[in-house]
Image (cartoon, rainbow, N blue to C red):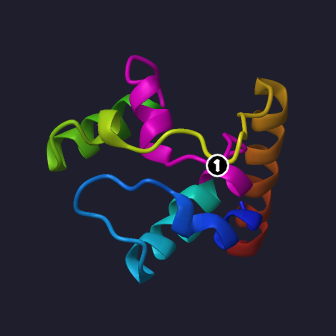
Amino acid sequence: WAVGFRHLDEVPLKPGWEPGWRWRLVYAVDYGAACIILAIGVQPISRWAGERIKHAPWRWLAALLNRLDAHHTANAGPLMWNTAPCRPAVRYLVTGIWAALLAIAIA
C-alpha cells in the first residue's frame, strides 16, 4: 500500500476522478484501511463489500453505498499492485488485534 503512493499517477481512474489530492486521500484512507486494518489487499472497501453483498457484515455497507451512489460497489476499483486478500484466518486475526487495541484505547 505505501509503495503504491509512488505509482498513483499510473492508475487508470474512473470518469470524474483525477490524480490529485482527492484521489490520494481516498487511496490513503480507504485502500489503507482495507490493507492495514482489514487485510483484504489494496482495494477499496466498497469493492470488497459489493463482492460479498449477500453476506453479513458486508450486506448493510454495500446496500448503503449503492443507495447513496447507484452501482457504487460495482464501479469501485479492483485489487491493485498485484496484491491479494490474506487467508481468512489471518484476516480475522488482524481485525481482532485492531479491535482489541481499539477496546484498550477506549477503556
Residue 72 picture location, percent across and down: 27, 42
Quadrant showing the C terminus: bottom right
Residue drawn at 65 percent across, 71 percent down: 5
Q: Which residue is mark 1?
A: 42
Left or right placement of residue 5 versus residue 23 in this view: right
Quadrant showing the N terminus: bottom right
Chain part drawn in magenta = 34-57
Q: As displayed, is residue 42 above or below residue 19?
A: above
Residue 14 picture location, percent across and down: 32, 52
Name the foreground residue: 80 vs 90.
80
Residue 54 lies within the magenta run: yes
Residue 78 picture location, percent across and down: 50, 39
Q: Residue furthest bottom?
A: 21
Which quadrant of the figure has residue 82?
top right
Q: As displayed, is residue 103 above or below residue 84?
A: below
Residue drawn at 50 percent across, 49 percent down: 44
Amino acid type of the residue tagged 1 in the rendering: Val
Q: Secondary structure at mark 1?
A: loop
Which quadrant of the figure has residue 19?
bottom left
Q: Residue furthest front?
A: 10
Residue drawn at 32 percent across, 33 percent down: 74
Left or right placement of residue 62 versus residue 30 in this view: left
Residue 70 lies within the magenta run: no
Name the foreground residue: 36 vs 13.
13
